[in-house]
């Protein structure tokens, strides 16, 4: 996709987007509502027309091609199985349109249903199977036509947490097995980081960063990416040279070209560790635990430092050593940090 | 109804509390009594004229005797004007109106829903307009047009144009309810992404999911055409209702008036039952 733009009246949904997806790769587009990720997918599918820009697949320009000639498989956020057809007929529908012989069609439909583990449900109607199963059938239906690109538009958002995680892993397994080029749109960062080869974080119709999940998380390109992907503490600091001094502690900078002066440093909660403090001394990194959120294996502890609060993510056993009300001394691990201008809104995390 | 439901739920919830329960059982009994009473009153309101009509159609020439003569007369009644052609024309009109109406409205509504959404309010207004214009006013508008086409010696079947307009509001409402009950946009997008062209999307994806709505539209169209008098009579076409009216003015043949009315009513009932049976079968086929 090159220079792709789309406006809805005065609203700019896509602003000159450039994105290249390699063959067999799974790219997840991540961003808040209205960032343009779904618009990107719909332009690619041909369900909407671009105002400007070009879309090429395998060297062929498909920008002006109607949706039914684009050869893209798509799974939608809403349940999209045809209610009057059985699961098998749904999966075979695309092949029927391609005039594939009925025996071959049936065989392929069952093959695809096997792939998603639903061949036993072939003769049921969509309303007779669960939401998760419906989305798996939709995936089988999209893959049955052997599309050049698979487009997934938040296919897991209507499902409950457990089914969502299972289906997420299943989608990744099938994508690797089939080796199909896939674009996955989601607003769930955990989903994007877990499933993708590369994650594209979008804001205001533009790509802020396109990189492997670990890089997006550990080396965010912009303060928006840092704040959108994972939780972030916003702490006042001062840049001098290649470090930023935050509450008396020097942390290395991600962007060495940052001009000296006061900034907001973005510190990940997992870079903060706690130790019990019985000295009673007041210090810039000494505070009181005010709340602990249990997340399973880890817990998130909120510490009041007097002038601000800071979040620390610890293993649950470590967090239990510091109940609410206890005095703690904080240590910030010297990971490279990103900074934002001080004019940004203050609320921490 | 909601009040009745919540009352029943409360009843189930307080089964253990004997005092309040007996009070509520009393309330429930009174409510049921009220229901049966209303049902009986309205039932009689509809049934008495129907039974009277059946009785008159079976009445012999002398008081207190019974005869099937009036029913036999339906076939042999020669008028003027003759009865059988009027029945035939009316049934044909019902079929033609239904077919034209479906062919016109179903694709238009689907197309507007999927492709020109901004037009849907205007379409709704156009379709509901005939409801706000009295039929007799419509006739004044139709008269010059029908006068002109009459020169070509066309039959009463030409009334279908007027009838399509007359049934538009009811058909629109029934079909709109059907379209609203599904996510037509997502279904069409899914079909498009699988390679379907627009006609395929409409005929093989959206229309089959509107069967119930289409049947409902037919349920409204057919009886309306079978009973339509206000337009046919002033335009001097002879349909069954017009024929029945002219027989009613000729007291000698009063018997055949009742038997033909009863027959047309039974026909309409049979048709409605058949349509709702087909609808149920279609629904059951999917459950």
Image (cartoon, rainbow, N blue to C red):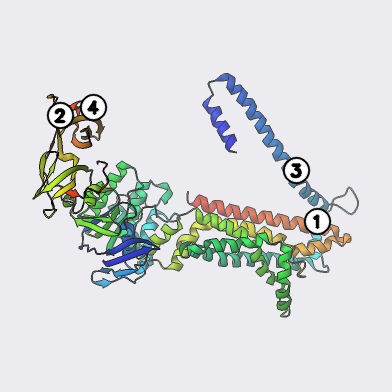
Q: Helix, strand, or loop for circle 4?
A: loop
Residue A141 vs residue A67, the one in the foreground: A67
Query: Pointer 3 and pointer 4: residues touching (CB < 8 Å)?
Result: no
- Residue B258 badge: 1
Residue drawn at (23%, 45%), measured in percent from left and top?
Answer: A230
A77 vs A272, nearest the viewer: A272
Residue B26 rendering spot, x and y as whole percentages: 64, 25
The lab-note entry on whether marks 4 and 1 share a chain reads no
Label 3, label 4: how many angstroms apart (C-alpha)? 75 Å
Q: Which residue is mark 3?
A: B44
The residue under the point 9% across, 42% down is A250
Q: Mark 2 to mark 4: distance in Å?
A: 18 Å
Q: Is residue A177 visible?
A: no
How many marks are shown on the rendered structure?
4
Q: Nearer the viewer, mark 2 or mark 1?
A: 2
Q: Are discs 3 and 4 located on one and the same chain?
A: no
Q: Is residue A323 above or below residue A191?
A: above
Chain label for disc 4: A
């Amino acid at each position: 996709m090159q220079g792709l733009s789309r406006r809805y009246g005065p609203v700019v949904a896509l602003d000159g987007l450039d994105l290249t997806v390699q063959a067999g790769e799974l790219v997840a587009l991540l961003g808040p509502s209205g960032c343009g990720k779904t618009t990107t997918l719909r332009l690619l599918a041909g369900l909407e027309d671009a105002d400007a820009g070009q879309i090429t697949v395998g060297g062929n320009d498909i920008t002006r091609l109607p949706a039914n000639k684009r050869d893209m498989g798509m799974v939608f956020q809403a349940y999209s199985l045809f209610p009057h057809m059985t699961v098998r007929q749904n999966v075979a529908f695309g092949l029927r349109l391609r005039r594939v012989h009925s025996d071959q069609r049936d065989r392929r439909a069952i093959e695809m249903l096997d792939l998603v583990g639903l061949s036993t449900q072939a003769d049921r109607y969509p309303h007779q199977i669960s939401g998760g199963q419906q989305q798996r059938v939709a995936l089988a239906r999209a893959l049955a036509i052997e599309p050049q690109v698979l487009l997934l538009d938040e296919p897991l958002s209507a499902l409950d947490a457990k089914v969502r995680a299972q289906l997420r892993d299943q989608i990744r397994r099938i994508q690797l097995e089939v080796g199909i080029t896939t674009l996955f749109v989601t607003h769930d960062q955990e989903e994007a980081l877990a499933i993708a080869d590369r994650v594209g974080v979008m804001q205001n119709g533009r790509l802020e960063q396109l990189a492997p999940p670990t890089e997006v998380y550990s080396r965010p390109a912009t303060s928006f990416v840092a704040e959108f992907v994972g939780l972030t503490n916003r702490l006042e600091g001062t840049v001098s040279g290649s470090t930023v001094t935050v509450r008396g502690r020097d942390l290395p900078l991600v962007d060495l070209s940052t001009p000296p002066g006061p900034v907001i440093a973005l510190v990940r909660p997992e870079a903060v560790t706690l130790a019990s403090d019985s000295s009673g001394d007041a210090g810039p990194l000494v505070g009181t635990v005010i709340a602990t959120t249990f997340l399973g294996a880890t817990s998130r502890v909120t510490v009041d430092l007097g002038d601000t609060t800071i979040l620390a993510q610890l293993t649950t056993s470590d967090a239990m050593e510091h109940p609410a009300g206890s005095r703690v001394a904080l240590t910030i691990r010297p990971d490279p940090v990103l900074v934002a201008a001080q004019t940004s809104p203050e609320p921490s995390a | 109804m909601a009040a009745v439901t919540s009352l029943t739920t409360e009843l189930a919830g307080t089964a253990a509390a004997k005092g309040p329960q007996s009070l509520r059982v009393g309330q429930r009994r009174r409510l049921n009594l009220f229901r049966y009473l209303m049902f009986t009153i309205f039932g009689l309101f509809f049934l008495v004229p129907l039974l009277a009509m059946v009785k008159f159609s079976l009445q012999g020439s002398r008081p207190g005797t019974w005869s099937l003569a009036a029913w036999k007369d339906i076939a042999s009644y020669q008028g003027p004007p003759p009865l059988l052609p009027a029945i035939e024309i009316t049934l044909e009109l019902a079929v033609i109106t239904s077919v034209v109406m479906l062919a016109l409205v179903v694709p238009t509504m689907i197309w507007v829903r999927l492709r020109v959404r901004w037009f849907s309010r205007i379409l709704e207004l156009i379709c509901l307009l005939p409801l706000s214009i009295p039929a007799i006013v419509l006739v004044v508008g139709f008269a010059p047009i029908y006068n002109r086409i009459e020169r070509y010696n066309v039959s009463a079947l030409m009334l279908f144009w007027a009838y399509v307009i007359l049934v538009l509001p009811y058909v629109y409402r029934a079909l709109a309810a059907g379209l609203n009950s599904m996510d037509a946009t997502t279904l069409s997008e899914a079909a498009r992404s699988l390679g379907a062209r627009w006609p395929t999307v409409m005929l093989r994806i959206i229309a089959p999911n509107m069967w119930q709505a289409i049947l409902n539209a037919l349920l409204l169209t057919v009886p309306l055409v079978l009973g339509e008098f206000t337009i046919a009579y002033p335009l001097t076409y002879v349909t069954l209702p017009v024929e029945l009216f002219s027989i009613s003015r000729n007291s000698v043949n009063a018997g055949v008036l009742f038997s033909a009315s009863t027959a047309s009513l039974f026909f309409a009932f049979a048709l409605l039952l058949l349509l709702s049976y087909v609808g149920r079968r279609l629904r059951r086929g999917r459950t």
